[in-house]
Amino acid sequence: MEKKLLGNTGMKVSVIGFGGIPIQRVNQDEATKIILECKNKGINFIDTARGYTISEGYIGNALKVVGRENFYIATKAMSYTYESMKQSIEESLKTMNIDYIDLYQVHNVSKKEQLDSILSENGALKALIEAKEEGLIKHIGITGHIREILLEAIENDEFETIQFPFNPVESQGEELFIKALNKGMGTIAMKPIAGGAFGKPDLSLKYIINSDLITVAIPGMDSVEQVSKNASIGEKISPLTEEEKKEIKKEIEDLGNEFCRRCGYCKPCPEGIDIPNVFIFEGYVTRYNLEEYGKSRYETLPVKADACVRCRKCEKKCPYNLPIVEKLKHAVKTFENL
């Protein structure tokens, strides 16, 4: 497995990492086998989150069998204040039953108010810095789906890594990644298979690895077979062939009129609908087969998709000309049928 330094952290991570969302679908025995296969295939970077229900617990239990020393552990929390982040760090350590976490990330920062809270005198960043000084965490990162928010966030030198969507159909992060790399930050590609929408996972991962923008891609995996297949992409990196480029181009064209890139240009919705998150949470149901998780995340939204009044202001702002109103109607049906 090829490895790269994760920015200036000193961590030499596998170019293919393990994304911890889908592991919620399996039991503990299967999860342990999956983590063992990661070790066997040279994957040494595991990414999970407080919000991924049982994911941290499964991973922590697996580490007792497979060996904590074989992995860099990254997790994250949607905690934006000092107290909430301090509590999240403590809960992550307790849930995984480990002494320290290699990378703790402020998760899914999507609003200016959230970023302001994080950076404030009593914000989450203060708790992360303290935890780092105490040796509870080694490094600090930030994740999100809105490019402009993260472009502002990485001006703060305390953030050592960024995590943002990147795959052949989502290239809106290129400027962000270039800026981060120039600052010596590590770059982590979330949604490397477009949330399961990209039909050729191996080509998507190969595209990412060849981009020179990403340190580690973290596809979600819930089987030993997936680990083996995805890991193979990082074992012998070769340039994309002309035929592979054609296949990727066709896949992009096929997804073009339906796939939300989560760029956020459709916002704000006059009715208050968080349009990108509606589609993200629906994707957990329709593509990840995580019905309960997707539904629980959707229910946290203060305004649901059925509040749409068909004004179509969002569609006029969408750079990809997506039929957002129809997609919102589809999302309403998806969650009504659960």
Image: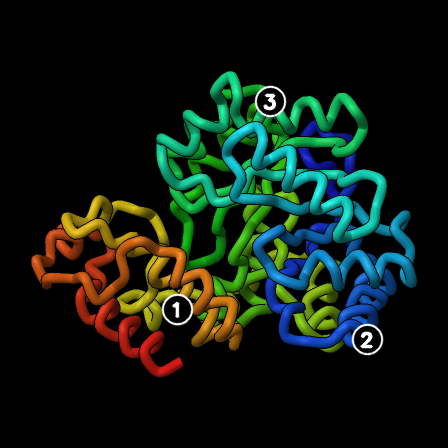
Q: CA distance from mark 2 to mark 1?
A: 28 Å
> In the figure, is residue 144 to the left or right of 305?
right
Q: Secondary structure at mark 2?
A: helix
Q: CA distance from mark 3 to mark 1?
A: 34 Å
The disc placed on residue 29 is 2
Q: Residue at (70%, 45%) from the top-left corner?
A: 91
Q: Residues within 10 Å of mark 1 (few under 14, many from 20)?
A: many
| Relative to 205, residue 86 above or below | above
Q: Position of residue 336 (x, y in %)?
A: 32, 78
First reached walking from the N terminus: tag 3 or tag 2? 2
Q: Are marks 2 and 1 in contact (CB under 8 Å)?
A: no
Quadrant where the image shows the N terminus: bottom right
First reached walking from the N terminus: tag 2 or tag 1? 2
Q: Are marks 3 and 2 in contact (CB under 8 Å)?
A: no
Residue toward you, 123 or 29: 123
Q: Which of label 3 and label 1 is nearer to you? A: 3
Q: CA distance from mark 3 to mark 2?
A: 38 Å
Residue type beneath disc 2: Asp
Q: Residues within 10 Å of mark 3 (few under 14, many from 20)?
A: many
Task: State the residue position of label 3.
Answer: 126
